């Protein structure tokens, strides 16, 4: 050691030992090999058990292991009943896709549908039938269940037997009615219950036209939409259908330079509102005043023959609600000048929901929209119970008029009905409650018998959501726990009590028997997904004679001056049924972008007034009931209002569901007077700051402004004619030439692999992107992306290969295309509009990440992809640091270990599950590319255009994402790319991305109007 | 000892730090150099097929932690079926052209023939097969060829490219119980890929 000391001190034998960096790494490498060998020896000492290789007992003829099969069934993520295809590999469902044949889904899904798979594999499913005795709970067999139910029904008075089911339609409805009539149970005792029953618009249609209906708004046929707090993109009657139509509606016609117009009048920007070209702010409850004044205005302007429909608005209300006459005139002008306008009301929640729906439908009627783009017949939600009907049922239960209650379809009554209704005490009054549930929930605690039901992916069923549009449920997996579905149990019960009450042994036979299908027809329709004989015809409607009386009775609420609370339905969790999916919990709320909790969403001014910041935890109180939530400051909400999403704060819905707070706790039983729907508006709440706070809000939002960076792309209809496709591409080529004068050789300095006929590319049309993040969740399911908990999200360690970035831009920025006003130096604008940018790996041709990897774990492929070899990655994270797009994600822990059994069954066997210390990123779904390439190679041809669709493009309901081969001129992606709106993210860096963005198009006329 | 040296000087002059590292690694590589060399040379040899108990050192240096013959639940003689009866590989492994898996024949497939072959009915292994079938249990075979989870290997593409079964699996026709003859290492895969001018890009197998 002394020698070394001397060497160090006086330079020693410096000349003799020449240690270059290269030599150092040589030795380093050798010694690493040595260390590796030791590790190998150690691993060999513990001899690993050889894996088992289990063959089939009998080979199913139709299945080849390792080849994916698709089965058509129906989604259960919300009552909309979209047709889906479930991809199963080795008889295990792996992914949900839209059914292209189905008229509602058209091959697309929303984010919720993707997460239904997590319901199926939920670790908190009910596995055994439970009977609750006085002292103990024990498991019983299905035969005993049938015996017990039969005995109870025999003893009970049929008039006191009640069913609570979902929105049953088609032959499922007939089944329940048959069951009831067999035992003399009155039909009224079958209560169809969904948390959101669309009762406002149903009642409004009844008052105006005498028909209870949820009309279908033909968004695709319209050229102007006025949304009055509408939510058709969030959670409307059919999210996917409306989103698909909206994509057609909103996309710009480049040649004609024309874009349809969309104005949103609301206190809050939900997903629908964020896609509007203009947001007119009103205080909560002001929409109906706005609508009435608008109706009066258009009658005055053009439709004087309808002057009897004018609505008396109390004097001074307009000023109190701060509604500007300018805005009304502007919207009235747009409505009158457009050829097929549409006014869409919300489906739930507002204080005077029915009045709002009524006035909106009246405007539509006056404008003649019923003949052009509204189908009055609409969706079959018309038999759903309202909250006031549920309330009267609870009263009956308390008065001991209910002997047996069957809760079907996994409904969580105790959770979805606000506590103030007294549902808990009512259920404990009922002598016998049977809950058919596939998942743990709070209702199970109040049930005497819990029957382990089948998940919709394991059962038979049907749904007729539009008259004549029948979708079938069929099992896509063998039942995981119990074997019989609820209807089969009811058939067995009925046949036990009364011989021959059903001529069928199973519900499947009953259903197809009722339809009268032959065996060939059954196969044909199951392959198709259903029977689609329906008609969305627009028929002229006539008003009822007593409409003027109804209008005369309309009441307007006074402005509530205090702090108010709005409960809204989140896009991803809906009424809370998807809350136990950890991927849905990690999903960033579409408006305030907070994950793993709901939040008290408020404007900047309100936050300043309350003296709170992002992440502070506040206590919201209303009449003694309190909830605690973190503050999320959001641009899209008016002052003095706090918005909180429903569907959180479960107590018994599984290990992941207990996040945030249940806002139903604060909601009082106040009904909309006309329809009996519950008001989701809580006036005059009190808020106090607590000492607790989050380290950081669990959000993926960074700086929400573009700050002059080339990250969000937008233009205006007015600017569009000046833009030139050829000039844009030439400028871009020049830029690349300047950056890399010698061309390709400078890109990698590598021996180029074999030339490939393909160069994969992606085009994202920002004009069509609505920011719903369905692509994010589809990517997570397809690519085995792990979820991380809230703590990790706060650290910013969430993994999502594609994320939807949101940048707010002001009208001034739009006017100057972001060049002069970067929104930072200039005056902050009052009006901001979001641009959504789905950001995935750009697969750069000159990728900055590739230069820096010391172990060649990432590199470029011959077909233009930027691959990542997970087994080669050592986790230096140099690549992520050098990536200007920040699309590389690091596994800080073994996140896959968080995935509990049997949730792991949903993992895609085609994609490696990454472990700790590995960098991962988007690869344009390389497994799908490879699958198609293999098929093409075997068939000795090239890959056809459209044969490969990455998960994000496949799910996108507005078709914003196009994927294909850029080397082929005729491919769809090359055609779409030849647009004058084309642009590249951070192009001045010269990375030459394979992803092209098409600018979002705003309308300056509307923005300034 | 070293730490008390002029730390400031040391860190200001990185070349000296370098030297410290060098000595450290010299010691390291000295100790394990021999092992590393042995590792390299062992890769050249083709492991011999011999019936022997589990050999620790051989397992280390051939990267084959398993004994050559796994204790299969039924001693299935490949040689009888192929050489004596003349069955083709694809007769039993029938998914090999269609799927990534070659497929192991189902118990019912075995029974399909064996219920009619009266000559071997009384053999203990055939009795076992009957027992499995009657119990309705799959035969718990042990995996002889096992690739790590981060490798995407498809039988289908290799068969369609004209690779013969024996090139990877060895002369199974003359084996009684199947055993591994190839190391299934990446080096071994790549050698063949290079010879046949197949793709050697990382993402061909790793994604």
Image (tube, coloured by chain):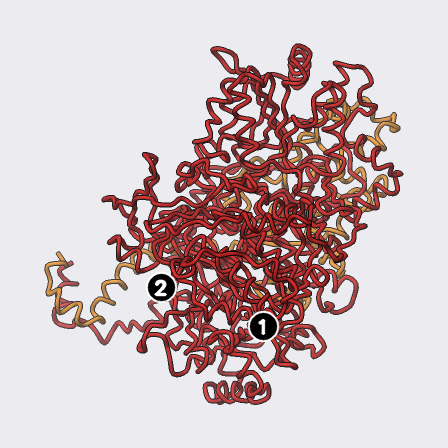
- Residue A360 falls in image quadrant: bottom right
Seen from the viewer's position, the closer of residues A580 and A262 is A262
User: Mark number for residue A864?
Assistant: 1
Q: How many marks?
A: 2
Compare residues B182 and A237 and report the one nearer the observer: A237
Question: Judging from the image, what is the letter of the chain drawn in orange?
Answer: B
Label 2 in the same subunit as label 1: yes
Query: Which chain shows up in red?
Result: A
Q: Are marks 2 and 1 in contact (CB under 8 Å)?
A: no
Q: Is residue A853 visible?
A: yes
Q: Is residue A752 above or below residue B60?
A: below
- Say which residue appears at 63% left-offset and 30% top-offset: A191
> Circle 2 marks a residue in which chain?
A
Sort mark 1 into few (<14), some (14-19) or many (20+) by Cα contacts within 10 Å.
Answer: many
- Chain identity of mark 1: A
Percent of width and height locating residue A535: 78, 54
Does the image show residue A868?
no
For mark 2, what is the residue?
A: A27
Residue at x 23%, y 71% (from the top left corner): B15
Q: Position of residue A366 (x, y in %)?
A: 64, 62
Q: Which of the two labelled residues, at mark 2 and mark 1, occupies the earlier sequence position?
A: 2
Location of residue A400 by image quarter? top right
Q: Position of residue A304 (x, y in %)?
A: 63, 67
Q: Which is nearer the eye, A704 or A611?
A: A611
Give above or below for A471 relative to B130.
below
B177 on left or right of A664: right
Residue depicted at x 70% and y 74%:
A971
In what element is the residue under mark 1? loop
Most foreground residue, A392 or B80: A392
- Give coordinates of residue A343: x percent, y percent: 59, 60
Q: Is residue A327 left or right of residue B6?
A: right
């Amino acid at each position: 050691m002394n020698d070394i000391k001397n060497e160090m001190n006086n330079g020693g034998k410096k000349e003799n030992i020449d240690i270059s960096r290269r030599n150092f790494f040589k030795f380093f490498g050798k010694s690493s090999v040595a260390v590796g060998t030791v590790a190998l020896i150690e691993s060999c000492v513990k001899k690993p058990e050889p894996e088992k290789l289990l063959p089939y007992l009998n080979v199913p003829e139709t299945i080849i292991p390792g080849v994916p099969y698709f089965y058509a069934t129906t989604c259960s993520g919300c009552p909309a009943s979209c047709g889906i295809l479930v991809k199963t590999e080795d008889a295990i469902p792996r992914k949900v896709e839209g059914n292209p044949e189905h008229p509602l889904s058209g091959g697309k899904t929303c984010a919720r549908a993707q997460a239904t798979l997590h319901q199926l594999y939920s670790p908190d499913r009910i596995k055994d039938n439970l009977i609750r005795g006085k002292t103990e709970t024990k498991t019983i067999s299905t035969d005993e269940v049938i015996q017990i139910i039969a005995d109870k029904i025999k003893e009970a008075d049929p008039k006191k037997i009640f069913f609570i089911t979902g929105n049953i339609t088609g032959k499922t409805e007939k089944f329940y009615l048959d069951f009831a009539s067999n035992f003399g149970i009155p039909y009224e005792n079958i209560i169809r219950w969904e948390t959101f029953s669309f009762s406002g618009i149903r009642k409004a249609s009844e008052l105006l036209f005498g028909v209870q209906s949820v009309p279908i708004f033909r968004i695709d046929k319209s050229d102007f939409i006025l949304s009055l707090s509408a939510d058709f993109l969030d959670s409307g009657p059919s999210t996917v259908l409306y989103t698909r139509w909206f994509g057609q509606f909103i996309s710009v016609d480049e040649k004609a330079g024309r874009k349809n117009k969309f104005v949103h009048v609301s206190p809050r920007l939900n997903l629908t509102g964020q896609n509007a070209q203009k947001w007119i702010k009103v205080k909560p409850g002001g929409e109906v005043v706005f609508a009435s004044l608008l109706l009066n205005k258009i009658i005055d302007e053009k439709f004087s023959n309808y002057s009897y429909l004018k609505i008396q608005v109390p004097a001074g209300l307009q000023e109190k609600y701060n509604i500007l006459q300018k805005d009304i005139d502007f919207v009235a002008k747009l409505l009158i000048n457009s050829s097929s306008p549409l006014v869409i009301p919300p489906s739930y929640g507002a204080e005077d929901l029915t009045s709002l729906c009524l006035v909106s439908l009246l405007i539509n009627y006056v404008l003649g929209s019923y003949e052009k783009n509204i189908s009055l017949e609409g969706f079959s939600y018309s038999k759903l119970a309202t909250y006031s009907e549920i309330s009267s049922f609870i009263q009956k239960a308390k008065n001991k008029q209910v002997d047996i209650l069957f809760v079907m379809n996994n409904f969580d009554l105790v959770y979805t009905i606000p506590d103030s209704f007294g549902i808990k005490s009512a259920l404990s009054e009922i002598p016998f409650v049977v809950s058919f549930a596939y998942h743990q929930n709070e209702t199970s605690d109040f049930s005497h018998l819990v029957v382990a039901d089948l998940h919709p992916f394991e059962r038979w069923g049907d749904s007729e959501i539009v008259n004549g549009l029948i979708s079938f449920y069929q099992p896509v997996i063998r039942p995981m726990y119990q074997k019989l579905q609820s209807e089969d149990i009811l058939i067995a019960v009925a046949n036990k009590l009364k011989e021959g009450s059903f001529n069928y042994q199973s519900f499947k036979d009953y259903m197809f028997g009722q339809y009268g299908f032959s065996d060939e027809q059954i196969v044909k329709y199951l392959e198709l997904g259903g029977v689609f004989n329906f008609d969305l015809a627009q028929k002229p409607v006539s008003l009822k004679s007593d409409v003027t009386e109804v209008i005369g009775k309309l009441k307007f609420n006074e402005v509530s001056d205090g702090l108010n609370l709005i409960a809204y339905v989140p896009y991803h969790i809906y009424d809370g049924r998807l809350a136990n999916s950890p991927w849905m919990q990690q999903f960033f709320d579409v408006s305030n972008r907070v994950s793993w909790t709901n939040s008290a969403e408020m404007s900047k001014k309100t936050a300043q007034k309350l003296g709170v910041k992002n992440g502070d935890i506040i206590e919201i109180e209303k009449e003694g009931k309190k909830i605690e939530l973190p503050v999320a400051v959001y641009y899209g909400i008016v002052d003095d209002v706090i918005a909180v999403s429903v569907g959180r704060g479960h107590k018994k819905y599984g290990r992941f569901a207990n996040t945030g707070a249940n806002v139903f706790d604060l909601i009082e039983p106040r009904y909309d007077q006309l329809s009996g729907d519950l008001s989701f508006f809580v006036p005059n709440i009190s808020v106090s700051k607590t000492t607790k706070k989050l380290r950081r809000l669990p959000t993926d939002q960074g700086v929400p402004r573009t700050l002059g960076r080339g990250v969000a792309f937008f233009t205006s209809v007015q600017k569009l004619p000046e833009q030139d496709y050829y000039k844009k591409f030439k400028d871009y080529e020049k830029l690349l030439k300047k950056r890399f004068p010698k061309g390709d050789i400078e890109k990698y300095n590598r021996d180029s692999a074999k030339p490939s006929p393909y160069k994969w590319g992606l085009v994202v049309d920002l004009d069509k992107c609505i920011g719903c993040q369905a692509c994010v969740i589809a990517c997570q399911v397809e690519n085995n992306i792990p979820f991380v908990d809230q703590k990790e999200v706060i650290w910013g360690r969430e993994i999502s290969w594609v994320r939807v970035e949101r940048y707010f831009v002001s009208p001034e920025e739009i006017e100057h295309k972001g060049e002069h006003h970067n929104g930072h130096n200039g005056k902050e604008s009052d009006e901001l509009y979001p641009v959504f940018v789905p950001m995935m790996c750009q697969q750069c041709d000159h990728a900055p990440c590739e230069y820096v990897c010391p172990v060649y774990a990432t590199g470029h492929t011959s077909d233009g992809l930027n691959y990542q070899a997970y087994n080669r990655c050592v986790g230096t994270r140099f690549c992520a640091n050098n990536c200007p797009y920040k699309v590389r994600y690091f596994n800080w822990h073994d996140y896959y270990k968080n995935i509990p059994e049997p949730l792991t069954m949903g993992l895609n066997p085609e994609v490696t599950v990454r472990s700790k210390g590995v960098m991962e990123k988007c690869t344009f779904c390389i497994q799908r590319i490879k699958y198609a390439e293999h098929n093409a190679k075997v068939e000795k041809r090239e890959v056809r255009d459209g044969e490969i669709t990455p998960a994000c493009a496949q799910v996108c309901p507005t078709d914003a994402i196009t994927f294909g081969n850029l080397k082929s001129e005729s491919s769809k992606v090359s055609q779409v790319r030849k647009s004058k709106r084309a642009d590249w993210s951070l192009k001045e860096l010269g990375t030459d991305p394979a992803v092209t963005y098409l600018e979002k198009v705003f309308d300056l006329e509307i923005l300034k109007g | 000892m070293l730490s008390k040296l002029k730390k400031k000087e040391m860190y200001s002059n990185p070349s000296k730090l370098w030297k410290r590292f060098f000595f450290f690694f010299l010691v390291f590589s000295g100790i394990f150099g021999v092992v590393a060399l042995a590792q390299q040379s062992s890769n050249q040899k083709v492991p011999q097929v011999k019936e022997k108990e589990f050999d620790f050192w051989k397992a280390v240096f051939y990267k084959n932690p398993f004994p050559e013959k796994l204790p299969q639940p039924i001693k299935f003689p490949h040689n009888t079926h192929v050489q004596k009866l003349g069955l083709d590989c694809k007769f039993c492994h029938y998914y090999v052209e269609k799927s990534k898996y070659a497929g192991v024949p189902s118990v019912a497939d075995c029974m399909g023939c064996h219920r009619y072959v009266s000559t071997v009915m009384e053999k203990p292994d055939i009795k076992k097969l009957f027992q499995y079938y009657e119990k309705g249990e799959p035969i718990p075979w042990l995996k002889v060829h096992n690739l790590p989870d981060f490798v995407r290997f498809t039988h289908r593409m290799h068969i369609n490219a004209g690779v013969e079964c024996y090139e990877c699996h060895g002369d199974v026709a003359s084996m009684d119980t199947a055993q591994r003859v190839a190391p299934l290492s990446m080096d071994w895969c790549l050698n063949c890929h290079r010879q046949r001018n197949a793709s050697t890009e990382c993402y061909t197998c790793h994604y």
